[in-house]
Image (cartoon, grey):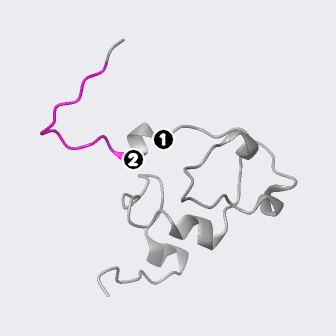
Amino acid sequence: MEVTLDALAPPPSTLLTARVIENLNEVEYPKDIKSPKVELDANVRDGRFRYDRDFLMQFMHICKEKPPTRPALDVLGIEPVDQAS
């Protein structure tokens, strides 16, 4: 199947192109991306990985959409951070 992209069309959503990771050791990151701390997932089960803050912060300018199943931050007792400042 050949996929062509219209030069004027917006890129696909990050969430729509995401895939399930089954083994963190098999993920190859670009050279300028630091891998997550493997010690956080020494006893991981069922693909429930934990990621350190430094790893996640590398993607803050790319991944701005929230998953539809994630509750609002105030429901979790977290105050949203103003990204403009």
Residue 85 spot, x, y in % from top left:
32, 88
**In the visual, does 6 lie left or right of 51?**
left
Residue 37 spot, x, y in % from top left:
74, 63
The residue lying toward the viewer, choosing from 80 and 57, is 57
Position of 73 relative to 67 (above/below) = below
The mark found on residue 14 in the picture is: 2
Distance from Cα at disc 1 to Cα at disc 2: 6 Å
Q: Outermost residue, right direction?
A: 43
Say which residue appears at 51% left-offset and 66% top-offset. 58
Say which residue appears at 23% left-offset and 29% top-offset. 5
**In the visual, does 44 lie left or right of 76?**
right
The magenta stretch is 3-13
Residue 34 spot, x, y in % from top left:
62, 61
Q: Secondary structure at mark 2?
A: helix
Q: Is residue 72 magenta?
A: no
Q: Amino acid at mark 2?
A: Thr
Position of 24 relative to 34 (above/below) = above
Q: Which residue is mark 1?
A: 18
Q: Badge 2: few (under 14), some or many (20 or more) residues near its Cα, within 10 Å?
A: few
**In the visual, does 2 lie left or right of 74?**
left
Q: Amino acid at mark 1?
A: Ala
